[in-house]
């Protein structure tokens, strides 16, 4: 039993890698569905939640800390999943949302731009190479900005992760094998002590969310 | 068989990881000794080679030719050490010196500054401020050097197959993870890759020989090898065409493993 977070740029193969790991390890997999759960817990639609949470915060949002409750809602949903003791999470900001928890394997996945462009064009044949490249660059920039404003951190800095894996030459299966070896290390084992910490973390998250929403 | 190249900041545990992997695979290990071996091959003092080679390229580069010769010597030494497909390298700019070679696993190690400072304090008895200043200075110099030489950012994780954080992993753990990667098919040295490694050795030796010869070192020449046939590309002045061409053929032809030298040089008139 262990918890793995995968951070990646869009179209970098993060979902496929998470799927491979989940199959190999027999763990549940969680991605952007966590947004839906968080939206439900806040009593808003998924669209509204996405708009509030995913767009880079403007000055007003930063001043009022309005966004904080949406972040807490996601963190709380994710923390509840973590209490099960095994999880492969490939949604937004796992490395930051679970920063307080011990024994979480934080992985960053990178892939060459060409590979990402091809992944998009395979499913969107009418979009040109230049448009796809521009789209990916824009999404990357937006995410980097979002991350800087939300966490004051550079998303691509490898020091935020335990390991960074590059799909330029490593196949998905090889990346999966390497991460499986990493997570097999005793430091990622969910011991009774860690399990207690997982539940305590979930309780802290619920408490913070409750305070932020005035519940 | 595999070739593992470890790139790291100073005091980031690269040598310890290299030793652990070399033991696991029973492969030879090569670190900064590559500089001594390269210096010996050129017959120059190792200190001079290190100083000139590590000096970063400048716009007006008075050591330009010398540095290119030294780098060619290091690359040739490394290519020779890697030729049988078994090597753990943790010396200077490994990932970059070997980047044209297929199947080389490039790993970067990172470690929190505090951990590196602590290592330096323990091994060299330095105070915290001096240790931190030293690490930052060496890191900056390396970053500038790689940028100047190869035009890439040494810190950019996309330049490596894998980056491992020693703030998390112990050396034995990192070693186990890298070993799994090195055994994957992408990094297995097959018969065909052995042939490519031999081509790389021959081409590296040819570049060094041309850089180390007074008659050819100022020419802008590159070498490509395939199964003993070496093609020399580049530009050279048309003066004494036959003489220069013969000299190039003689120098390259003397290298072990070369069967044929093919000149694909663009001769130009320096006084049109």
Image (cartoon, coloured by chain):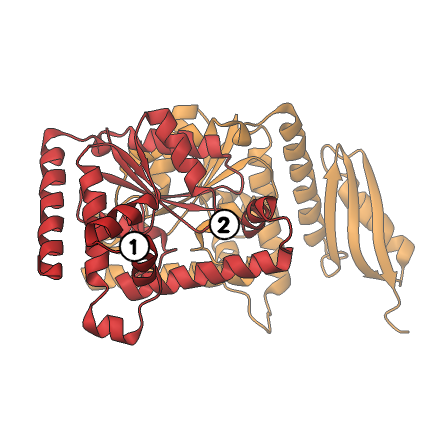
In the rendered image, what is the letter of the chain coloured red?
A
* Quadrant housing residue B175: top left
Image quadrant assignment for residue B17: top left
Q: How many marks?
A: 2
Instruction: Give the distance between the C-alpha atoms of the residues marked 1 and 2, in whole angstroms.
Output: 41 Å
Q: Nearer the viewer, residue B119 or A140?
A: A140
Which numbered dot is residue B159?
2
In depth, the one of A42 and A63 nearer the eye is A42
The chain letter for the residue carrying disc 2 is: B
Query: Residue A95 location, x and y as percent?
Result: 28, 49
Nearest the viewer among B110 and A140 is A140
How many C-alpha atoms fall within 10 Å of the one at disc 2: few (<14), some, or many (≥20)?
Answer: many
In this structure image, what is the colour of chain B? orange
Per the image, the residue denoted by label 1 is A45
Q: Does mark 2 fall on the same chain as mark 1?
A: no
Please say whether residue B215 is visible from this viewpoint: yes
Q: Is residue A43 left or right of residue B147?
A: left
Task: Tell whether label 2 touches label 1 (CB within 8 Å).
Answer: no
Image: B48 above or below B171: below
Check disc 1 and report its element: helix, strand or loop. loop
Query: In the figure, is residue A102 to the left or right of B180?
Result: left
Q: Residues within 10 Å of mark 1 (few under 14, many from 20)?
A: few
């Amino acid at each position: 039993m262990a918890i793995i977070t995968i951070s990646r740029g869009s179209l970098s193969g993060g979902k496929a890698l998470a799927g491979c790991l989940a199959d190999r390890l027999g763990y549940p997999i969680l991605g952007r569905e966590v947004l839906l759960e968080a939206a439900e817990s806040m009593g808003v639609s998924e669209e509204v939640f996405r708009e509030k949470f995913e767009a880079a915060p403007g000055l007003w949002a930063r001043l009022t800390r309005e966004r904080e409750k949406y972040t807490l809602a996601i963190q709380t949903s994710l923390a509840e999943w973590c209490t099960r003791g095994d999880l492969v999470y490939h949604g937004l900001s796992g490395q930051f949302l679970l920063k307080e928890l011990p024994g979480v394997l934080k992985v960053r996945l990178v892939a060459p731009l060409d590979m990402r462009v091809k992944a998009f064009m395979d499913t969107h044949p009418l979009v040109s190479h230049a448009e796809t490249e521009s789209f990916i660059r824009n999404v990357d920039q937006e995410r980097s900005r979002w991350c800087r404003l939300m966490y004051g951190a550079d998303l691509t800095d490898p020091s935020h992760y335990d390991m960074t894996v590059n799909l330029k030459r490593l196949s998905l299966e090889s990346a999966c094998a390497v991460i499986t070896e990493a997570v097999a290390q005793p430091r990622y084992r969910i011991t009774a002590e860690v399990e207690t910490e997982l539940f305590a973390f979930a309780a802290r998250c619920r408490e913070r969310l409750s305070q932020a929403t005035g519940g | 068989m595999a070739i593992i190249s470890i790139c790291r900041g100073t005091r980031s545990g690269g040598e310890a990881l290299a030793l652990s992997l070399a033991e696991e695979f029973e492969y030879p290990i090569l670190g900064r000794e590559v500089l001594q071996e390269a210096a010996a091959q050129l017959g120059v003092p190792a200190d001079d080679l290190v100083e000139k080679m590590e000096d970063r390229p400048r716009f007006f580069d008075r050591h330009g030719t010398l540095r290119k010769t030294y780098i060619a010597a290091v690359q040739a030494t490394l290519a020779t050490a890697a030729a049988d497909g078994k090597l753990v390298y943790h010396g200077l700019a490994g990932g970059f010196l070997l980047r044209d070679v297929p199947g080389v696993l490039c790993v970067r190690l990172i470690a929190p500054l505090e951990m590196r400072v602590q290592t330096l304090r323990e091994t060299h008895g330095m105070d915290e401020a001096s240790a931190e200043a030293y690490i930052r200075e060496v890191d900056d110099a390396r970053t500038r050097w790689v940028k100047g030489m190869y035009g890439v950012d040494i810190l950019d994780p996309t330049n490596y197959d894998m980056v491992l954080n020693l703030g998390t992993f112990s050396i034995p753990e990192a070693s186990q993870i890298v070993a799994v990667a090195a055994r994957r098919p992408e990094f297995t040295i097959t018969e065909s890759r052995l042939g490519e490694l031999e081509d790389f050795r021959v081409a590296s030796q040819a570049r060094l020989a041309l850089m180390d010869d007074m008659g050819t070192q100022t020419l802008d020449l590159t070498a490509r090898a395939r199964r003993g046939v070496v093609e020399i590309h580049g530009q050279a002045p048309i003066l004494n065409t036959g003489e220069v061409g013969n000299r190039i053929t003689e120098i390259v032809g003397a290298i072990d493993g070369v069967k044929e030298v093919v000149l694909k040089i663009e001769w130009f008139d320096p006084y049109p």
